[in-house]
Amino acid sequence: MAEVLNKILDGHSAAKGRRELAIPDFPSHHREAKGASGGRMAPVRFLMDASLFPADVLARTAHRYTGDFFVDLACSDNGHTVALTPKHQDVGITDIEGRFRNDALDERLRERIRAETTDLHVSLAQAALRQASPRGPSR
C-alpha cells in the first residue's frame, strides 16, 4: 500500500522534495466552505512528525475526517502538514488537532500489528482454505 501511495504522491508533486495529496479529491470550488458570516472557514493546520507517522498512516487517519472536513496533506521528508477545513459551520473543531493525533497513533499501532501478524493471517487463511477444499468423493 505504501508503494501505491508513494506513486500517487509522486504524481502530485508540487515542488522538489514535497508531495501533496488532497483527500478527498474535490474540485477547488468544493473547498470554499463558508462560515456563518459568509466568509471562507479557516482550516486548522498542524505539523506531524514524518519519522513517527508515514504518509500512508496519515492518509488512513485523514480518511476518518472526510465526512466533516476537507482534508489536505502536504508530505515531505521533514514533516507532514495537515489542514482540516470544516465543510459546514456546525462542524466542531474543538480539540481537532488532539483528536487527529490520537487517531494517527491508533493507525500507527494498527499498521504495526498488521505487519507483525501478517504471517499468522496468511497461515489462518491457508488453513481455512484447506478445510473448505473438496477432498474427493465421500463413501
Image: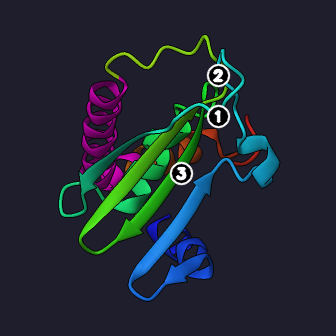
Q: CA distance from mark 1 to mark 3?
A: 16 Å
Residue 109 in the image: above or below residue 67: below
Amino acid under disc 2: Gly
Label 1 or label 3, whichever comes before in sequence order: 1
Q: Which residue is label 2 attached to?
A: 35
Quarter occupied by residue 70:
top right
Q: Which label belongs to residue 72? A: 3
Residue in front for this viewpoint, 124 or 38: 38
Magenta residues span: 96-121
Q: Which mark is residue 40?
A: 1
Left or right of residue 9: residue 39: right
Specify the quadrant of the image occupied by residue 97.
Answer: top left
Amino acid bearing label 3 = Asp
Local SS, label 3 = strand
Q: Mark 2 vs mark 1: which is more N-terminal?
A: 2
Coordinates of residue 71 in the picture (x, y in percent):
55, 44
Q: Nearer the viewer, mark 1 or mark 3?
A: 1
Q: Secondary structure at mark 1?
A: loop
Q: Closest to the observer: 6 or 87?
A: 87
Q: Residues within 10 Å of mark 3 (few under 14, many from 20)?
A: many
Judge the density around disc 1: few (<14), some (14-19), many (≥20) Cα neighbours within 10 Å: some
Q: Tell me if label 2 and label 3 are in contact, CB under 8 Å.
A: no
**Cβ atoms under marks 2 and 1 closer than 8 Å:** yes
Q: CA distance from mark 2 to mark 1?
A: 6 Å
